[in-house]
Image (tube, rainbow, N blue to C red):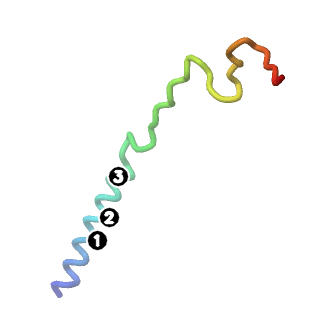
Amino acid sequence: MIDNFSIAVTHGLLLLAMWRLIHRDDLDVEEPPERNKEPDGFLKPPSGSGSHSDA
């Protein structure tokens, strides 16, 4: 009898914790990242003299 009661209590507490986590207002709110002032990656204009010579 005590075993069933302890399992029911622990499962009930887990369900309560899950319920409270699921219904938090800030759970699905995420601020977008700040944009870079200077672009990175492939869209960045080449820096330097502008001409490359391999010779």
Circle 3: residue type = Leu
Q: Which residue is mark 2?
A: 15
Check the image and report above or below for 34 versus 10: above
Please report the residue visible at 71 percent of the width from the left and 19 percent of the height from the top. 46
Q: Secondary structure at mark 1?
A: helix
Callout 3: few (<14), some (14-19), or many (20+) C-alpha neighbours within 10 Å?
A: few
Where the C terminus falls, by quadrant? top right
Q: Which residue is mark 1?
A: 11
Please report the residue visible at 51 percent of the width from the left and 30 percent of the height from the top. 32
Label 1 with label 2: CB-CB less than 8 Å: yes
For marks 1 and 3, the one nearer the N-term is 1
**Residue occupying the far bottom of the picture:** 1
Check the image and report above or below for 52 versus 25: above
Q: Position of residue 36 (x, y in %)?
A: 55, 22
Where the N terminus falls, by quadrant? bottom left
Q: Secondary structure at mark 3?
A: helix
6 left or right, relative to 22: left
26 left or right, relative to 4: right
Label 3 with label 2: CB-CB less than 8 Å: no
Give the Cα separation between the discs numbered 1 and 3: 15 Å
**Residue occupying the far top of the picture:** 49
Q: Position of residue 7 (x, y in %)?
A: 24, 78
Give the Cα separation between the discs numbered 1 and 2: 6 Å
54 left or right, relative to 17: right
Circle 1: residue type = His
**Residue occupying the far left of the picture:** 2
Q: Secondary structure at mark 2?
A: helix
Q: Quadrant of residue 19?
A: bottom left
Check the image and report above or below for 54 versus 8: above
Circle 2: residue type = Leu
Q: Which residue is mark 3?
A: 21
